[in-house]
Image: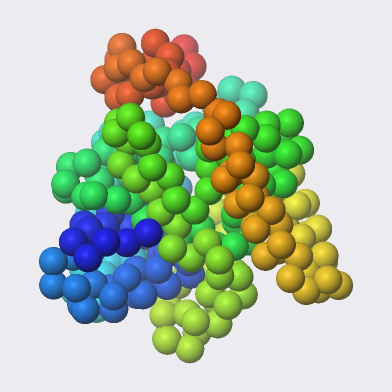
Amino acid sequence: MLEYDDHLAVAVSGGKDSLTLINVLAKLESRFPKSHVTAISVDEGIDGYRDEALELARKSCRHLNIKQVIVSYRELFGVTTDEIARTNLGQTPCSYCGVFRRKAINKAAANIGATKIATAHNLDDEVQTVLLNMLHGDPMRIVRSGPVLRDPRGKFLPRIKPLCDILEKEIVLYAYLNGIEFQSVECPHGHEALRNDIRAFLNQLELKHPGSKFTLQRTAERLRNSLAETVPLLELHQCEKCGDPTPHELCEACVMLEAIAA
Ligand SMILES: [Zn+2]
């Protein structure tokens, strides 16, 4: 995943996973003089939740001597997640928030001249997503996601997930043992309902049949390796509104922003 002279843009929300990741990467960076690590924090505009997390992220970055860049939805998109949650658009705010967060991080990473984007998805997140995609009837999305994403067209920065093989509970343990103070409050807008059920199911499965999560991860990896060649690469154009690469006339974020404005 890593090269000796990478400039990593690390998505740091202030939760246990991202603060563990930035701590580990800061340690690694100190051993490679040509590498850089910059934290990117996104302020989605979630009252009573995000401020605490941003403050924890700020404290951690200062302690590690890592530069932190904060980008906000208000500034980039003119709307916050709280405002989106109050509209009646038929979808959960999480689906908007996910698309906007990806775009915000991409933009910030490009601005600082990063070579890669690192996110703190853990093993639990990864296998939940595999099952979620299966239950959504979208197996090709399993092939297009995964721990390392490189765009052969060179339009998007490579994305890596260094914690993808670490169980969530081991990350919590690492954070406690290293005195990492993280936010433990859940987002007031909740999570996707189906993902919650999958999380509970996988935890139960792992308890009765230890190793199940790893097996699922390895299965997805083998699927990706054997199917990667068969998934056609969509041709990318520039979004007519924002100029970002997209296979359609408008990128997903601009379509959503139009729906919110309407
Ligand atoms: Zn756009």
Say if residue 138 shows up in the picture: yes
Q: Is residue 149 above or below residue 183?
A: above
Q: Residue at 53% x, 74% y: name it.
A: 171
**Nearer to the camera, 119 or 13:** 119
Q: Residue at x 51, y 58 (%)?
A: 121
Residues 251 and 14: in front is: 251
Residue 119 lies in quadrant: bottom left
Relative placement, left or right, of 200 versus 247 is right
User: Looking at the picture, how far across and down is residue 204, in whole percent?
Assistant: 82, 66
Name the residue at 37% across, 59% down: 1
The answer to whether one can see residue 86 in this image is no
Along the line of sight, the residue nearer the viewer: 70 or 6: 6
Q: Position of residue 36 (x, y in %)?
A: 19, 63
Instruction: Say which quarter of the image contains residue 45.
Output: top left
Q: Residue furthest bottom?
A: 177
Residue 60, image x, y percentages:
31, 73
Q: Residue furthest left?
A: 34
Percent coordinates x, y for residue 253 in the rendering: 42, 26
Q: Quadrant of residue 214?
A: bottom right
Q: As rendered, which of 57 and 23 lies closer to the eye? A: 23
Eyeballing the image, is 181 above or below 131? below
Is 59 placed above or below 144 here? below
